[in-house]
């Protein structure tokens, strides 16, 4: 995965895996071992991806799985705001990467991005000590069929965007939105 030049200039780094249990779990492990970030952990597939409330995040190849490690990004009582920051950054990244899609996007606060009313991306914020991990999954080419809320992916919605291009745009948008926050 390649970072947006603005993110790279800001000192953001990335570690990419082909397969990993969970990008959030790996990001938390990096934080436990002294990594201060900002650093993204990405994977082509996850074997134990998860969503909010312990839900499973189906992790087919062709989608984006990425987690950002931040150390002490804010006072603890403001960390929940990072879900909103991440949602705005993801909205910015998808809207900028795919011309004409912005009017079809909606945020389902605090952690989902919808296209045409169907979920195609989710955000999971986890923390431990001074570290915060922002996990983001984007359905680029696959989506689960049996879900509580209607789901889709970018390709099914008639849009083409590779995980690599979505990540590059996301890394820049996230750096910008965190700076604004």
Image (cartoon, rainbow, N blue to C red):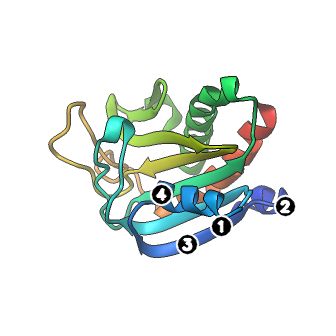
Q: What residue sits 28% from the left and 49% below the top?
A: 156
Residue 179: where, in percent of width, then height? 80, 39
Instruction: State which tag comes first along the sequence, 1 or 2.
Output: 2
User: Residue at (49%, 48%) from the top-left corner?
Assistant: 136
CA–CA distance in space, label 4 to label 1:
15 Å
Q: Is 61 left or right of 107, judged from the image as shown? A: left
| Label 4 vs 3, first from the N-terminus | 3
Q: CA distance from mark 3 to mark 2?
A: 19 Å
Q: Residue at x 22, y 49 (%)?
A: 144
Q: Which residue is mark 4?
A: 25
Q: Which residue is mark 1?
A: 14
In terms of depth relative to the viewer, which is nearer, 33 or 61? Answer: 33
Q: Is residue 173 above or below residue 31?
A: above
Q: Closest to the observer: 42 or 116? A: 42
* Circle 3/circle 1 CB separation < 8 Å: yes
Are the two marked residues, 4 and 3, in contact with CB atoms closer than 8 angstroms?
no
x%, y% of residue 31? 64, 57
CA neighbours of label 1 inside 10 A, class few (<14), some (14 to 19), many (20+): some
Report, in whole angstroms, how far the alpha carbon at label 4 lies from the one at label 2.
26 Å
Q: In the picture provided, is 145 more to the left or to the right than 156?
A: left
| Furthest residue in direction left, as rendered | 146
Of 174 and 73, nearer the camera is 73
User: Under tag 2, what secondary structure?
Assistant: helix
Which disc is residue 9 wearing?
Answer: 2
The reply to whether residue 1 is in sight is: no
> Circle 3 is placed at which residue position?
16
Q: CA distance from mark 4 to mark 3?
A: 14 Å
Q: Is residue 111 visible?
A: yes
């Amino acid at each position: 995965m390649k970072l947006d030049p603005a993110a790279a200039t800001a000192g953001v780094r990335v570690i990419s895996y082909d397969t990993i249990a969970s990008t959030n779990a790996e990001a938390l492990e990096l934080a436990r071992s002294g990594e201060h970030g900002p650093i993204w952990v990405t994977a082509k597939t996850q074997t134990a991806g998860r969503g909010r409330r312990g839900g499973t995040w189906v992790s087919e190849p062709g989608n984006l799985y990425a987690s950002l490690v931040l150390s002490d990004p804010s006072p603890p009582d403001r960390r929940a705001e990072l879900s909103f920051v991440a949602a705005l950054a993801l909205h910015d990244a998808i809207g900028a990467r795919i011309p004409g899609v912005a009017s079809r996007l909606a945020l389902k606060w605090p952690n989902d991005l919808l296209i045409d009313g169907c979920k195609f991306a989710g955000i999971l914020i986890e923390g431990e000590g001074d570290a915060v991990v922002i996990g983001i999954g984007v359905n680029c080419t696959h989506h689960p069929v049996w879900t509580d809320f209607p789901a889709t992916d970018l390709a099914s919605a008639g849009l083409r965007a590779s995980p690599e291009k979505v990540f590059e745009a996301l890394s820049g948008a996230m750096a910008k939105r965190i700076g604004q926050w």
